[in-house]
Image (cartoon, rainbow, N blue to C red):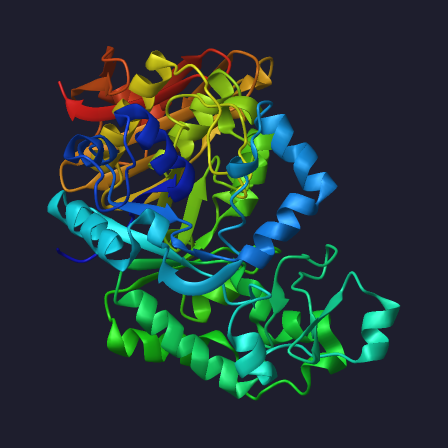
Amino acid sequence: MTGWPTAPVIYEIGTWPWLAGLSRRYGRPVTLGTVPGEVWDEVAAPGVDAVWLMGVWERSPAGLAVARDNASLQRAFRAALPDLADDDVVGSPYCVRRYRADDRFGGPAGLATARAELHRRGLRLVLDYVPNHVAPDHPATADYPNWFIQGTGADLAADPGAWFEAAGRVLAFGRDPFFPPWPDVAQLNAFDEGLREATVATLTWIGEQCDGVRVDMAMLVTNDIFAGTWGEYAGPAPSTEFWPPIIGRVKESHPGLVLIAEAYWDTEWTLQRQGFDFCYDKRLYDRLTHEGAESLRKHLVADRGYQDGLLRFTENHDEPRAAASMAGVRGRAAAVAIATLPGATLWHDGQFEGRRTHLSVFLGRYPDEPADPELRSFHRRLLSIASGVRRGEWRLLDSHGWPDNPSHRDVVAWSWHEGATRHLVVVNFGDQPAQARITMPWPGLAGRSWELTDLLDGRVFDRDGDELAGEGLFVDLPPWGVHVLGVEPA
């Protein structure tokens, strides 16, 4: 298995519901060790570089009990699964009792088989790590209490929703500073040196079993955020940040391991500098989902080096399904954008088929939903095309129009160039038709004719090089229309 590509495409699979669906499909229990080869072939679509098996670790019985007793969660579960059964609620994969592959998935041997099957098809394996919290029945709550945020009996009496008792001590429930505590997890103390040593050991252990690690809510344990969340309960902040020494030591053992930070609150640049290879681009997701072309354009003026360290997506297990939040042609325009921009790209199991139901991570079964064959064909073609487009120099391009036609403001364009290979991506990120002139980035266009082939639909446009070099490329796009153009001499 060779090293990671610079702009990997990662496919996220929710392990429990995926295996449950395969078990129904084949009429027998399917574990990670017994997934049929034809299924791995389906996963290994052209253009995919890695598979993130989300939620392979042992889940907590105590956390499961909390989920089954929580009325608010039960309402959300029934919204996704109207025929909800007791065994559909399986507990959160982020309420980890042990970092050991669950025996229900085939245990460590099954996980090793899955990794080997992925490697055989040229794919890498990504697994999870949760630095901020563990299950309330994790063995460390009794064995290593100093790893946790501790309170007093008075704290517990004053706010039983924020504290719980374990092995005779009062520990905090996990939280981030903007939401109430999570009642199914215990809060680790990121300032404790013993916890930091344990983090090195755990990440190193996980790195022996995979090629990349997605780190849950990675910004919560940075010194400033952790101190702001926990104050005096955390004790004095160490002189060093949490991540840089930990990542440095883990990569001494696993130099090829890719670390991906789930990042919010504009902490992407901070986490990149602290050693993460890629960070979630949640800001781009919000712009694609709720905003327009000018917002998208402003986002893309960032330095190329910074953009290369971002992970772009239009859905994941935390966000609504793209088919619901960006239905129809807007969703396709957004998909073309994330597939052809610099940085890593994340796709989510069921996204290509147009699944619309957002499934809670606590649930172990997907609802039955009809697949959209045309949408699946679009995504598969886009993945295959994008792998050949994103090479070499990337540039955000200017678009301009006419005094009586401001529709060009909805047009966003960028180019890729490597050697003699040129590609141009044009997106009308608006709900009205748009016309624009795109300023072409390449010298030597004048004095010859050029052939522009739309790689998505096969249309061919012949254009005069003098016009391209002077006025620019004229485009006329329907609402949310796109071009992914290969540009060659006629």
Work out whether residue 110 or residue 360 is closer to the camera in this orientation and state it. Answer: 110
Which residue sits at x=52%, y=11%?
433
394 relative to 407, above or below: below
Q: Position of residue 430 (x, y in %)?
A: 55, 20
Work out whether residue 242 or residue 201 is closer to the camera in this orientation and state it. Answer: 201
Q: Is residue 61 left or right of residue 15?
A: right
Which residue sits at x=53%, y=26%?
357
Residue 457, quarter of picture:
top left
Which residue sits at x=25%, y=15%?
463
402 relative to 20, above or below: above
Q: Position of residue 14 (x, y in %)?
A: 41, 41
Work out whether residue 169 or residue 133 is closer to the camera in this orientation and state it. Answer: 169
Q: Is residue 104 left or right of residue 26?
A: right
346 relative to 399, above or below: below
Q: Is residue 5 visible?
A: no
Residue 46, quarter of picture:
top left
Q: Position of residue 195 (x, y in %)?
A: 51, 81
Q: Is residue 250 left or right of residue 143?
A: left
Q: Is residue 118 visible?
A: yes
- For the C terminus, the image quarter is top left
- For the N terminus, the image quarter is bottom left
Which residue sits at x=42%, y=51%?
310
